[in-house]
Amino acid sequence: MTTGYDRIRLESLRDKVISAEKAADLIKDGMVVGSSGFTKAGDSKAVLPALAEKAKNEKIKITLMTGASLGHGTDGKLAEAGVLSKRMPFQVDKTLRDKINKGEILFIDQHLSESAELLHNKNLPPVDIAIIEAAFIDRDGSIVPTTSVGNSVTFAALAKHVIIEINTAVSEDVYGIHDIYQAENYPHRNVIPIVAPWNKIGRRSIPLDPNKVIGIVFTAKKDSPADIAEPDAKTTAIARHILQFFENEVHLGHLSDRLLPIQAGIGKVANAVLMGFKDSNFYDLTMFSEVLQDSTFDLIDSGKLSFASASSVTVSEACYERVFGNLQKYREKFVLRPQNISNTPGLIRRLGVIAINTAIEFDIYGNVNSTHISGTKIMNGIGGSGDFARNAYLSIFVTQAASKENAISHVLPMISHVDHTEHDVDILVTDIGLADLRGLAPRERAQAIIDNCAHPDYRDELQSYFDRACERGGHTPHLLEEAFSWHIRFSETGSMKK
Amino acid sequence: MTTGYDRIRLESLRDKVISAEKAADLIKDGMVVGSSGFTKAGDSKAVLPALAEKAKNEKIKITLMTGASLGHGTDGKLAEAGVLSKRMPFQVDKTLRDKINKGEILFIDQHLSESAELLHNKNLPPVDIAIIEAAFIDRDGSIVPTTSVGNSVTFAALAKHVIIEINTAVSEDVYGIHDIYQAENYPHRNVIPIVAPWNKIGRRSIPLDPNKVIGIVFTAKKDSPADIAEPDAKTTAIARHILQFFENEVHLGHLSDRLLPIQAGIGKVANAVLMGFKDSNFYDLTMFSEVLQDSTFDLIDSGKLSFASASSVTVSEACYERVFGNLQKYREKFVLRPQNISNTPGLIRRLGVIAINTAIEFDIYGNVNSTHISGTKIMNGIGGSGDFARNAYLSIFVTQAASKENAISHVLPMISHVDHTEHDVDILVTDIGLADLRGLAPRERAQAIIDNCAHPDYRDELQSYFDRACERGGHTPHLLEEAFSWHIRFSETGSMKK
């Protein structure tokens, strides 16, 4: 393994090496900055933190676009320092979230496949400076990214200037795990020729005009590790319901026991479902997803999963060592793509993806809220859930039936914010059970959801709402004056219970 | 032109000719029936009406799937006769709508691209009998459809039995205006090789196993004509705002004056926008849409529109004669595709479609309701608006700012039913003005919508709601206890005004 300057294989760029502080000085008030980083993987670990530091003493406000969330608390540091005027397309940071909800920072919650499109189509302001983490710069000036691709291909292509963070903590062996492809601009866009998760259709590095490079910064810091929570009784129950459903679909001849490519959102439930496959009869499984977690590599190790496609690897420290310390073993098993490819609608439908995503709450008709508390305060963002749910072969959403000692029901008469309409939701699952909504009209959906998914403490009240709404009539019966009464009661009394 | 039996070119099928009544007798209680017909074009004109007649004296209930809405009041006749237990994926009939809203008929409101997918994936019950209108049956037993393709390719492929309605009022010259393509089943689906609206990638007739044909019925009845309403002051104003927006996008270098393929929903506004192009500087325009209306052919005649792709032609009587009486002139100018191709997400994004659809109401954050009155009663259905809006290059929604002597505001604090989330809405237009929401966070969107789209009678109240919600905080500030107060006030007083 080489380190330092050897990683700048285009020698003419070697005099661009600067400190993180100098790089941060290149970022001026009012700029639009595009940074690598997707679910804590492959993010800027030097320049953005240095910018946050610098902003403690200097007024500077930028628009920051990334792939998705950043690691190392960087979003929080930037928010705290007042650097962010606008942020997109996703975040998970508590400090940043609080400032968004106070209206101090503007946030655009975007489908993760769309940010790159919007930039290419000039529907967003142009990027002034891109900051891209790299394993090395190749002889042609192209960049080999690290543990995520995110929007870096678009940022590199469109930004006026580029700062590269060479991370020597990442092995140069990552060369070849990325599939770098950028669709043509309109009106000359062609077919994206992926027909299976393992197809590689692009380059191995991100093309970049070396004249745009205004700084190269060295770092040697690993990605923030993923938080791995052990499955609990609820996530285990949810996973069991989903696996039973899959087994039954195979039994009915709807699916083979290879299933179809799986997308799994981040978190405990996704990990629990994937781990459930380990002891199942399914085989030769594949993933076409956006983030690969520990469970992906566990399933590869168990021989159940043949191939996984995504935009980032976000894993625990132990799993990181296992994967990136044994790339020879894993490199033919996964690929990282730009997020406008990993999440592109046409591919999701073409491949027939089975999408499993987490809801904050859903209503009796199957509409799903993935983002907002009480219709007002954002948690994280829609992420890729909409890209996948809309175009999936099967769209599954999961949540716990109730929480906070059952003071909160996650199955509601009407949700306070809609991210996924009932048209895009096939299967709903809670720890209580699974509602198969395929082929059901709204009134049938309501009964299936109340019967199968609602927590017993809330079932009668949901039934009462539904029955009284049906008496008044309608295709989707509602009592508008009562529709949000559960949310309002919770804010007044601390419980949704009457 | 040949008539009658000559239109059954596969001679062995000629002994299948039966009366519409006999054909209706083949449909039994409990069956799933798939019928041609898309926005009144190419629908069953003999067998379904005969079924409605028969059901006056006999209990028979079926699930009816179509392409979209039927003509000749057939949906109303079927609903009145009590034939329909379940209906999908779209309707526009008053009698049927009333029964849906009373809960007497179950309706599934589907993205029009998805019904065929759901059938192929066995996510819906199998089709027992398909009824397909044809211009003629070719020598190989394949069917040449008439003025729409809809879901007929899927129905023909999957139904156990098929009844063909040969409509001798349609010229056999329609041969060649259809592009019949069916994507492979999972997991072997390949690329759909369309990269421009005019690409023809399939056959000219619908493949069909002649052994499945259980009846051939002759009809000689034209499609119900489209209702053409002249542009009024509001639709003209909306169209003007949109055209000015396009002109400005060209001026800014975002689009060329060929624009990109246009999708336009049915109705007055779409017609008004398209007619507006006649006297513009735009040229060599194309459409990638689902329905072609009079305005499409007017634009072709004016030399502004080069090519139009859709799933049906739904035009006035005069336009029908002009187009189908001069197919030699028009046949190279348009193509009709299966609705799972005309509306497929991947193609809409690949081509960069500019989507223009009509809303019932939208809220200050840009969420759109296309289907429900007061969150409860359905009007028509989502149709293809979701297919296009989600994946479009630009997604535009239009509505009047206020109606019923301004007793109803169509711009609201919160909409009562969400079909399109703010993530999928770029531009909102009313007769008052246009709000360009690209690159705006929710609080910015709200101000742009209030300032540009709201009717003056409601602007202060919207501003008051927004201001008070912002005081309480949140990424998407709302006052849940007040969010539906406008709808509730209207139902109580007949006006949304305080």
Image (tube, coloured by chain):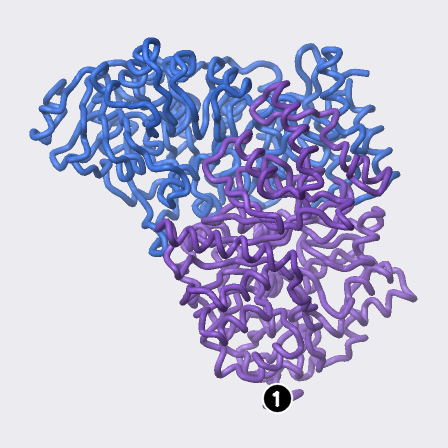
Chain colours: A blue, B purple
- Residue shown at the point (57%, 25%) measured from the top left: A239
Q: Which residue position is annotated with label 1?
A: B6
B11 versus A281 height, above or below? below
Name the residue at the right extreme: B57
Amino acid type of the residue tagged 1 in the rendering: Asp
Q: Is residue B103 left or right of residue B329?
A: right
Residue B190 visible within the image = no
- Residue shown at the point (22%, 31%) measured from the top left: A144
B388 versus A116 height, above or below? below
* Residue A143: quadrant of the picture: top left
- Residue shown at the point (77%, 32%) measured from the top left: B485
Residue A191 visible within the image = yes
* x then y, percent, for residue B202: 45, 67
- Subunit bearing disc 1: B
A137 versus A352 height, above or below? above
Q: Quadrant of the N terminus of chain A?
A: top left
* x then y, percent, for residue A438: 66, 43
* Residue A240: quadrant of the picture: top right
Secondary structure category for the residue under label 1: helix
* x then y, percent, for residue A68: 41, 27
Q: Nearer the viewer, residue A8 or B484?
A: B484
A167 versus B48 height, above or below? above
Q: Residues within 10 Å of mark 1 (few under 14, many from 20)?
A: few
Q: Is residue A233 left or right of residue B394?
A: right
- Residue shown at the point (42%, 55%) measured from the top left: B351
